Image (cartoon, rainbow, N blue to C red):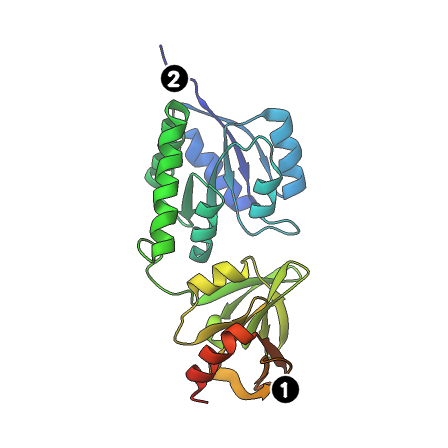
Amino acid sequence: MSEAPLRIVVVDDEPLARERLRRMLGQMSGVELLGEAGSAPEARALIARASPNVVLLDVQMPGEDGFALLRSLEPQPAVIFVTAFDHYAVRAFEERALDYLMKPFRRERLAGALERARAQRRDPAALARRLDELLRALERGGGPPAHHLERLTVRVGNRIDILKCAEVLWFGAEEKLVFAATADGRHYVNFTLDQLDRRLDPARFLRVHRSAIANLDFAESLRPAFAGTYRLVIKDAARSEIPVSRQRARLLRERLGA
């Protein structure tokens, strides 16, 4: 008995990217393209209507990103992230993504990802075990990614800008949103502080508070505050001050040679 085709939805805000995926899928057997969407709301409606078992999903889109869309889906189909940026890979697997394709990729790479989707249908527990092993390796510091995060992408209006992590003064969180503070202002990023803490270069960055990670290259001075806490003054035009918790103060003082 032949295996049922994979029922696929493509979600990407770039028409050319959707066209390329449509062309690749058209050259493959055992797949059925149910439709395309260019935004998270459009995709949510399409997925609810079509009930795909695989979604090829871009990360960065206007408004809601691919991660927000994935978290809102119930039940969740198998998701293969398709993106031009490598630094979302860890988060993608934390969100239980099936695979992660870096643009531009060859048709053979897409075919391999779709074969994983077929394997998941045959044995869902096997994929869950593979993802758990990967995440444990990442938590131990083994496995990908072997390099530190060097760049971030941020959306400025309709434009996507690339920030070098070395130029970020500090990372902070407010109302569950994480931002990168630079000389030009604050830019919201698609990472949690815990994820950044694992990915950033520890020779340069230090978690000084549950709500802040400082780039020590831009540390100017350390000012005592209340009950053993401190304020770290940053070398920027505003002389910004970052809270330093009592638990992290000793390590920060050691790193600064204070």
| Amino acid at dot 2 | Glu
Could you tell which of marks 2 and 1 lies nearer the N-terminus?
2
Q: Quadrant of residue 124?
A: top left
What amino acid is at disc 1? Arg
Q: What distance separates the C-alpha of mark 2 from that of mark 1?
A: 63 Å
> Which residue: 62% across, 81% down?
241
The residue identified by callout 1 is 239
Q: Can residue 13 be seen from the camera position used here?
A: no
Task: Please identify, in this view, whether the residue under mark 2 or under mark 1 is nearer the observer.
Answer: 1
157 sits left or right of 31 in the view = right
Mark 2 element type: loop
Labels in figure, total: 2
| Above/below status of 99 relative to 230 | above
Residue at the disc numbered 2: 3
Residue at image position (60%, 36%) is: 73
Image coordinates for residue 79, horizontal then vertical, percent: 48, 37
Give the residue displayed 38% in from the left and 17% down from the top: 3
Quadrant of the frame with the N terminus: top left
Measuring from the top left, give residue 239's x and y in whole percent: 63, 86
How crowded pointer 2 is (Cα within 10 Å; few <14, some 14-19, many 20+) is rated as few
